[in-house]
Amino acid sequence: MAKTWVLDTETKGTGAHIAPLEKVQQGPRKEQELATVKLERPPRAPRAQGLPAGPLTFKVLDIRSSEVLSEGLDARATVEVLAGVGSVVDVRIYVWMQKAARWRLLTLAEQRALWRFRDAALAG
């Protein structure tokens, strides 16, 4: 007995293929249900109850002589130290970061903000 073949276009993206008529007449095969994976965020670590931030402490470094002009002073005392400096670009100002336990260089905008306080102190 001869088999009848038909063009099966059931496939998607890969093109059609030739299949026996009996297979096509059975209808489409049941699609297998895809397994769904749910991703969950890992639990966050509880925040450590750290020390309170406290007042900021600054360090001023003269870049021309590499001399530390002041270290461990509060903002008001740092502004007083800056009164003896000619230009904001002549110094580097650092702030103490308690959590990181290191000095962080202030950005130029932050240094200029302290410089404006210095100008106001000199004017008043």
Image (spheres, helix red, strand yellow):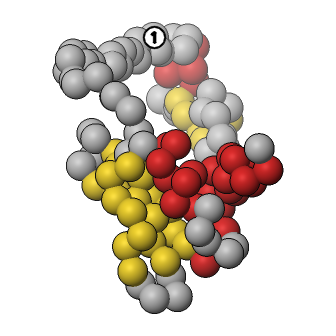
- Residue 2 x %, y %: 52, 33
Out of 66 and 36, give the one closest to the viewer.
Answer: 66
Out of 34 and 97, give the one closest to the viewer.
Answer: 97
- Residue 60 x %, y %: 45, 64
- Image quadrant holding the C terminus, namely top right
| Label 1 sits on residue | 30
On screen, residue 25 above or below 52: above
Q: Is residue 105 visible?
A: no
Q: Is residue 113 left or right of residue 67?
A: right
Q: Please tell me how many numbered marks the rendered image carries.
A: 1
On screen, residue 27 above or below 67: above
Q: Is residue 60 left or right of residue 21?
A: left
Corner quadrant of residue 88: bottom right
Say which residue appears at 38% left-offset and 33% top-offset. Answer: 55
- Report crowding for label 1: few under 14, some 14 to 19, many 20 or more residues within 10 A (C-alpha): few
- Residue 90 x %, y %: 61, 78
Say which residue appears at 22% left-offset and 24% top-offset. Answer: 51
